[in-house]
Image (cartoon, rainbow, N blue to C red):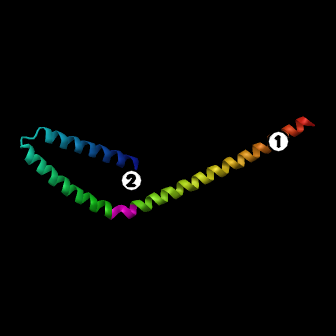
Amino acid sequence: MCNRNTETSLAAFLLGAVTGIALGVLFAPAKGETTRRKLKRWADETYEDKKDFVLEHANEWKNQLKEKAETAREKITEGKDKVVKEWNKRKEEIAAKFKKDEE
């Protein structure tokens, strides 16, 4: 499972890679046609590699998301139950106070 530092590092790496590629293309001495061909080949290869990676890990990620969703549901239910319990307690206290004041 990824932690926050890993996610931040990955995002920084990807941003650096995209920036590097963009600068490389802008300052490349090759003709536009040659550059486009190279970029297409690189994009096709990268797409296939990443597609395989995603397909291999999709079930793992799906299960992790399900676990996190279930944990979130449990925490929300616990919180709701606490709020309802506290509300009922306060409601009874306020009702008792008003009854006492009326007498």
Q: Looking at the magenta stretch, what is its main secondary structure?
A: helix
- The reply to whether discs 1 and 2 touch (Cβ–Cβ < 8 Å) is no
Highlighted range, magenta: 56-60
Check the image and name the residue furthest to the top: 101
Mark 2 element type? loop
* Residue 26 image point, x, y percent: 14, 38
Q: Residue at x 38, y 53 (%)?
A: 2
* Residue 12 image point, x, y percent: 30, 43
Mark 1 element type? helix
- Asked whether, in this view, residue 83 is left or right of residue 69, the answer is right
Q: Can you tell which quarter of the image residue 61 is in?
A: bottom left
Name the kind of residue labelled 2 in the image.
Cys
Image disc number at residue 28: none
Vertical comparison of 25 with 42: above or below: above
Q: Mark 2 sits on what residue?
A: 2
Q: Residue at x 19, y 41 (%)?
A: 22
Q: Residue at x 36, y 48 (%)?
A: 7
Image disc number at residue 95: 1
Quarter in which the N terminus is drawn: bottom left
